[in-house]
Image (cartoon, rainbow, N blue to C red):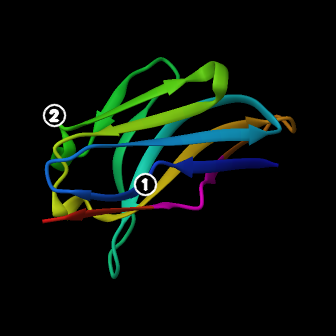
Amino acid sequence: QVQLVESGGGLVQAGGSLRLSCAASGSIVSIATMAWYRQTPGNQRELVADITSSGVTNYADSVKGRFTISRADAENTVYLEMNTLKPEDTGVYYCNALVRTARSTWSPFWGQGTQVTVSS
């Protein structure tokens, strides 16, 4: 099986920065797209940013120019650098990865989520 473990969330003042990390482990053959989503109470989980295995990135309009997604394939890790944080960035951030497992099947996996709170 595959596990994704996020870290780096916390409480920060508006205008501050945080860096999230997500490390994948388990029966991994390869990882395609990795992504970060966030969810606030009463709302659906929304895509924040994703990055393909070739390094092509995609961002939600609300975070463009402030957030940067990157990955370290040797460590099966994806990062989200968040700068100029706003109160509306508050939410639970989830890591997602499309993984080819040792069973040679592609499946999406999710982390447990990490809370980000931005105070005004």
Badge 2 crowding class, 10 Å Cα cut-off, few under 14, some 14 to 19, many 20 or more, is: few
Q: Where is residue 62 in the image (x, y as percent from the top left)?
A: 16, 49
Q: Position of residue 80 (x, y in %)?
A: 39, 39
Describe residue 20's horizontal placement relative to residue 30 as left or right. left
Residue at 36% over, 71% down:
44
Quadrant hosting residue 93? bottom left
Label 1 secondary element: loop
Describe residue 56's horizontal placement relative to residue 113 as left or right. left
Q: Position of residue 77 (x, y in %)?
A: 58, 32
Residue at 20% over, 57% down:
13
Q: Is mark 1 in CB contact (under 8 Å) with mark 2?
A: no
Describe residue 111's horizontal placement relative to residue 46 as left or right. right
Residue closer to the observer: 18 or 29: 18
What is the span of residues highlighted in magenta in the rendered image? 108-114
| Mark 1: amino acid | Gly
Q: Position of residue 102 (x, y in %)?
A: 86, 35
Residue tagged 1: 9
Please report whichever mark, 1 or 2, sits nearer to the chain's N-terminal start: 1
Rendered image: mark on residue 65 = 2
Label 2 secondary element: loop
Up-down relation of residue 89 to residue 51 (above or below): below
Question: In the current view of this chain or complex, which residue is farthest to the right?
Answer: 103
Up-down relation of residue 91 to residue 32 (above or below): below
Rendered image: mark on residue 70 = none
**Distance of mark 1 from mark 2, alpha carbons?**
20 Å
Question: Where is the C terminus found, in terms of image quarters?
Answer: bottom left
Badge 1 crowding class, 10 Å Cα cut-off, few under 14, some 14 to 19, many 20 or more, is: some
Residue at 55% over, 42% down:
22
| Eye-nearest disc, 1 or 2 | 1
Quadrant hosting residue 87? bottom left
Up-down relation of residue 102 to residue 117 (above or below): above
Residue closer to the observer: 5 or 15: 15
